[in-house]
Structure formats: structure tokens, C-alpha cells
Amino acid sequence: MTVRIDGEACTGCGLCTDSVPDVFKMGDDIAEVIKSDVPANLEDDVREAIDNCPVEAIIAE
């Protein structure tokens, strides 16, 4: 799984960074991806962050 943040949609709420700090971090105003290739052991956590994102700014492929 690869993941990215839609910078136009992200509101910087910090939910993803709190949920999966090994994959996401807060930038100046929005979340950023630390590891675009998500390790297998974190895929479930990233899927949960995607489901919980209030603005659907996390995109997985």
C-alpha cells in the first residue's frame, strides 16, 4: 500500500499523525507522509486513519 495526503483537502486536524506517527507527521499547516510505502504491519492502522479522516484527505493506492 502506498499513501499520500491531499494537501488541498487536509485541515491539519492531526488525527492521522496521532494514530500512525510512523507514517504521518504534522507539517507547518497540514499532515505530511513520512513513509509513502506503508509497512505491512501498519496497513490496518493506516486504513483506520483513512476511515476516520474528517475530510477524506488520505489517499491510499
Image (cartoon, grey):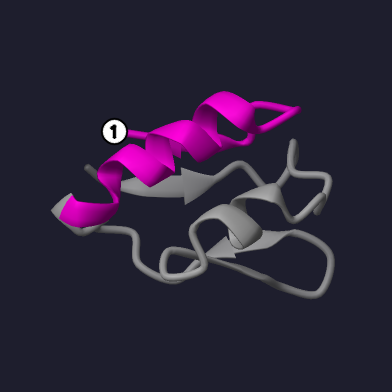
Quadrant of the image containing the C terminus: top left
Indicate left or right for 47 with 26 as reference: left
Residue at horizontal 74 percent and vertical 43 percent from the top = 10
Q: Position of residue 39 (x, y in %)?
A: 20, 59
Q: How far from the left and from the top, in percent, is residue 36?
A: 34, 59
Relative to 12, say whether 56 is above or below. Answer: above
Q: Which amino acid type is shown beneath numbered disc 1?
A: Glu
Across the whole image, how many numbered discs are drawn on residues?
1
* Residue at 42% from the left image edge and 70% from the top image edge: 22
Whole-percent x, y for residue 1 in the image:
22, 42
Q: For residue 25, which quarter of the picture?
A: bottom right
Residue at the spot x=83%, y=45% of the render? 11
Secondary structure found at label 1: loop
Mark 1 closeness class: few <14, some 14–19, many ≥20 residues within 10 Å: few
Looking at the image, which residue is at 51% across and 32% down? 50
Position of residue 56 measured from the top left corner of the image (x, y, whole percent): 64, 27
Q: Is residue 1 left or right of residue 17?
A: left
> Which span of residues is magenta-colored?
41-61
Q: On the image, numbered disc 1 is attached to which residue?
A: 61
> Is residue 54 located in the magenta-colored stretch of the structure?
yes
Magenta stretch contains residue 9? no
Q: Is residue 54 left or right of residue 20?
A: right
Q: In the image, is residue 37 above or below residue 5?
A: below
- In this view of the protein, which residue sits in the foreground, 3 or 49? 49
Residue pushed farthest left?
40
